[in-house]
Amino acid sequence: MVFDKDSVSVMEEKSCIEIKERVQAYADSQGFVLNPDIEKLNLVLKGLHRNVTKHGAEYCPCRIKTGDPEKDKDIICPCAFHKDEIAKQGFCHCHLFYKT
């Protein structure tokens, strides 16, 4: 993973690497692949990191939190909608997971 050192802290980069390892393992277990566009992939990973830091969970950075913990658990990555989205359009809403 390559980040612009001016735009991310060491802690953020470490967190993004850990998130990438987790989502990569999930993708592998489900027969998906991660977005091959490294810049777009890094944007999603940074968004997940930001949501962990700000909200305490890996909420999908492309969806809006409602503030209702019960509803918002559906948008923790991988969100409740990603499999249907991948089946219909070949990728999830935030372009993290793709059909192989």
Image (cartoon, rainbow, N blue to C red):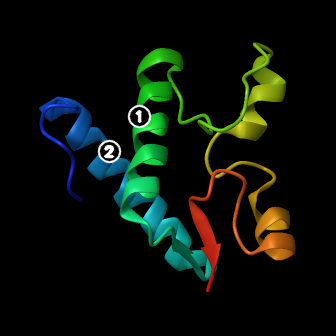
Residue 100 in the image, given as x and y percentages of width and height: 61, 86
Q: Is residue 63 left or right of residue 36?
A: right
User: Which type of secondary structure does the marked residue at label 2 adopt?
Assistant: helix
Which labelled disc corresponds to residue 49?
A: 1
Query: How far is disc 2 from disc 1 in space, using C-alphas?
Result: 6 Å
Residue at horizontal 43 percent and vertical 27 percent from the top: 50
Residue 5 in the image, given as x and y percentages of width and height: 12, 38
Marker count (numbered): 2
Q: Quadrant of residue 15?
A: top left
CB under 8 Å between discs 2 and 1: yes
Residue at horizontal 48 percent and vertical 38 percent from the top: 48
The crowding category of the residue bearing disc 2, from other C-alpha atoms within 10 Å (few below 14, some 14 to 19, many at least 20), is many
Residue 98 in the image, given as x and y percentages of width and height: 62, 73
Under mark 1, the amino acid is His
Residue 35 in the image, given as x and y percentages of width and height: 50, 67
Under mark 2, the amino acid is Cys
Q: Is residue 22 left or right of residue 9?
A: right
Q: Which residue is mark 2?
A: 16
Q: Quadrant of residue 13?
A: top left
Q: Earlier in the sequence, mark 2 or mark 1?
A: 2
Residue at horizontal 60 percent and vertical 34 percent from the top: 59
The N terminus appears in which quarter of the rendering?
bottom left
